[in-house]
Image (cartoon, rainbow, N blue to C red):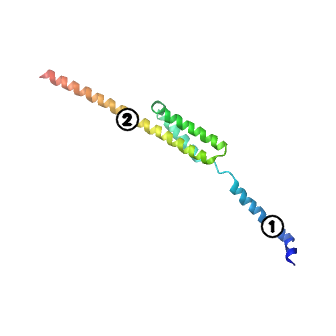
Amino acid sequence: MTKEQSYFSPRGKTLRLILGTSIFLVLAACASAPLPPTQQLQAAETAIRSAEQESVAEFSPLELRQAHDKLNAARVAVQAENMELALRLAHESRVSAELATARTAELKAKAVNDEMQQSINAMQQEAMRTQGSSQ
């Protein structure tokens, strides 16, 4: 059998078909869009829910609004199949929600500290009055 005859033989056609299909599948896999950042979007949603449970809207409304806005923008980016942007925005959303939670905790602690300081001052004044009137 000559080289030309083996090329056109059923076996040669099958090998070419397999090779062509393999190349097509490899190229299709490379060209497909990356997967949406589902875990990062869920992490951002969880951080926002957690922040909302901590009464963040009262103490850090700007950061909470930013977290919501970035999460919504990440969802739009997923729909536009811009997964890199969606991933970045999902991370930023989670960080904004965590910042809001941390800032709220700081402001709550400061409020408790201020209240305690006022109580201490009132007790000191009362002690001074009591001490002054007993002399």
Rounded to the nearest angstrom, the CA distance separating label 2 from label 1 is 72 Å
Q: Residues within 10 Å of mark 1 (few under 14, many from 20)?
A: few
Report the side of 43 relative to 106 (left or right): right
Q: As rendered, which of 134 and 38 lies closer to the eye?
A: 38
Mark 2 or 1, nearer chain start: 1
Which corner quadrant of the image does residue 128 belong to? Answer: top left
**Secondary structure state at the residue bearing disc 2:** helix
Residue sitting farthest toward the left: 135
Q: Identify which residue is drawn at 13% across, 22% down.
A: 134
Residue 49: % across, % down: 52, 37
Residue 34: % across, % down: 65, 51
Residue 102: % across, % down: 44, 39
**Secondary structure state at the residue bearing disc 1:** helix
Which corner quadrant of the image does residue 76 belong to? Answer: top right
Which corner quadrant of the image does residue 72 belong to? Answer: top right
Amino acid, disc 2: Ala
Q: Which quadrant does the C terminus fall into?
A: top left
Residue sitting farthest toward the bottom: 1
Q: Identify which residue is drawn at 78% across, 65% down.
A: 18
**Residue 109 numbered tag:** 2
Q: Which residue is mark 1?
A: 16
Q: As rendered, which of 22 and 112 lies closer to the eye?
A: 22
